[in-house]
Image (spheres, coloured by chain):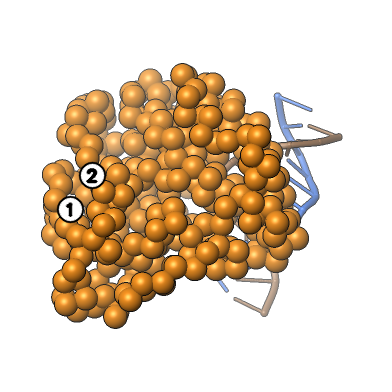
Chain colours: A orange, B blue, C brown
Amino acid sequence: MELESESDWECAGRIKFSGEFDLSATLSSGQVFHWLPKGKGWVGCVGSSLVGVRQSKAEELLVLPSDQTDVIRHYFRLDEDQAAIFATFPRNDAFFWQAVESSPGLRIIRQPLWECLATFLTSSLKQVAHIQGISLALRAAIGEEHHAGWGTGFSYPEPRAVSEAGESELRKLGLGYRAKSVALAAEELGKGNLSLETGRTCSSDEELREFLCQFHGVGRKIAHCVMLFGYGRMQAFPVDVWIERILRHAYYQGDPSVKASEMEIFAGDHFGPYAGYAQQFLFHHARVHLGKDLEK
DNA sequence: AGCCAGGAAAGCG
DNA sequence: CGCTTTCATGGC
């Protein structure tokens, strides 16, 4: 089955939701890196479940197998009151709303914690296309293969499996110097005396960030990515090179002396409790629509 | 406080 | 085909 014909989706589950949602844009927006387009939809794993998803209408998703609809609804935050979130954004920021308008259907995904941490550890100083390649190679080499009549996919390997593979194996998969960080984190978590679940109980964002920064290779940027895409801390605002460029351009008249730390504070202040959500619009807009023009 | 290694491929001309 | 850049961090 190539998921190309209507009959391939006949037994799919159906999710009706309200608000803006763009499946393709969300899966290609640099928060998750392993989904592959197939036929009219996308195939990938959510945790250890192989899932096929297709946007059949503006406000409808088809899900294979049909018993994964709840998982997918949760994964893409389709149960959230999006209008209420949009209402928290600053109304008088024309630049920001232009970024929203260019892809209003972007949503923040709720990712499993370990694969989120490991993936962003491998993402440092790499391009999205490259992270995708490594991410898939790692899953295919160490992860578990899942089959369905309509497709195949690999789940992200558990910490134990990554730790057993070791740093040298990860290097062979193209992780470079990042292999050390991933191997160390896998070792730490595989032993079982430390769990990422502990982070869920942190009462403040600062506490959670400090918890995450204990891992080798995790600084503020990666911590904020895991907080936003994994823990659902919607105010976490990762400042990477793209965000730095776009904020400098839009809010600081291109002033090169403004530092990332200052931008972080400004963002929380300016965009509010869903600053991380706002970041995703700005990031996507910077990459897709502005690109090189931003340099000047 | 600022600089630089580390590591590989995509993205440019 | 070569050169630069790349969703950073840790250590000096």
Q: Is residue A106 visible?
A: no
Query: Residue A68, how many percent across, how many down?
Result: 29, 55
Kind of residue indicated by mark 1: Ile
Let me know if marks 1 and 2 both belong to one chain.
Answer: yes
Q: Is residue A289 left or right of residue A223?
A: left
Residue located beneath label 1 in the image: A15
Query: Residue A282, how many percent across, how many down?
Result: 36, 41
Say which residue appears at 44% left-offset and 40% top-offset.
Answer: A230
Chain letter, disc 1 residue: A
Q: Judge by depth and name the residue closer to the eye, A294 or A211.
A: A211
Marks 1 and 2 sit apart, C-alpha to C-alpha, by 9 Å
Mark toward the start of the polypeptide (1 vs 2): 1
* In contact (CB < 8 Å): disc 1 and disc 2: yes
Which mark is on residue A144? none
Kind of residue indicated by mark 2: Leu
Q: Judge by depth and name the residue closer to the eye, A141 or A119.
A: A141
Query: Residue A269, how many percent across, how many down?
Result: 38, 20
Secondary structure at badge 2 equals loop
Secondary structure at badge 1 equals strand
Give the number of callouts.
Answer: 2
Say which residue appears at 58% left-offset and 32% top-offset.
Answer: A212
Q: Is residue A148 left or right of residue A238?
A: left
Which mark is on residue A78? 2
On screen, residue A73 above or below A226: below
Mark 2, residues whose alpha carbon is within 10 Å: few (<14), some, or many (≥20)?
many
